[in-house]
Image (spheres, rainbow, N blue to C red):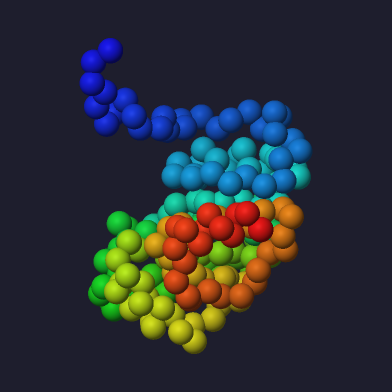
Amino acid sequence: TGAEGPEELEVPRLHVAPDADRFLNLRRLQAELDVSIAIMAGFIKRVPSLCRLGTIYANPEDLAVCARWLPERLEECVIAVSSKDLDWNKDSEIDKALLHLDNLASETQRCRCQMLHVCLVSGCRSTRVHLREKLTGFDLPPLRLSVSSVPAKSTPMARPVDHVMQLEEHTELEERFSSWR
């Protein structure tokens, strides 16, 4: 065959939700869900045993919408907000994101998700340091906030969900080692 371009190497996008009947006993769904909320909402709500969900990618202004479609039984849901969605170096952009996080905390209490983990993702170390400084002292139960170079993942079923906000540095290597525990 000839040389493959980037289009041939991309993972296909979902345009229709998977058949929920095939996943009735699924307890943890860990995937990179960069798909429409409308597509996944019906699927997630029809999987009765699902209790941990990650990782959903969202813009800050879509965070409250994400919380509205979460099923009530979730122990944990992980949402990633990346630097491609915001300019994390501007305090005004961070303040706007924090306002959306405040709205998200209200929605999370209404949907009764036990732990909603929002991971702010940036590939730039200095930006992550700046975000950590802005988030120090910012507490919105039941939200757990983290700042990382890679999107966070939902907690494996063999471990309890950690409810502590993590502003320390997470690296891809640490992520690999933590999955071995």
Q: Residue at x 58, y 30 (%)?
A: 18
Q: Residue furthest top?
A: 1
Would residue 106 be seen by someone viewing this image from the given angle?
A: no
Residue 180 falls in which quadrant of the image? Answer: bottom right
- Say if 3 sits above or below 65 in the image: above
Position of residue 174 measured from the top left corner of the image (x, y, whole percent): 51, 62
Q: Is 168 left or right of 131, judged from the image as shown?
A: right
Q: Nearer the viewer, residue 157 or 106?
A: 157
Position of residue 39 measured from the top left corner of the image (x, y, whole percent): 51, 38
Would residue 56 be seen by someone viewing this image from the given angle?
A: yes
Q: Is 19 left or right of 147, judged from the image as shown?
A: right
Q: Residue furthest bottom?
A: 137
Q: Residue at x 48, y 76 (%)?
A: 167
Position of residue 113 measured from the top left corner of the image (x, y, whole percent): 66, 61
Q: Nearer the viewer, residue 77 or 160?
A: 160
- Say if 131 sits above or below 1 in the image: below
Q: Residue at x 32, y 25 (%)?
A: 8
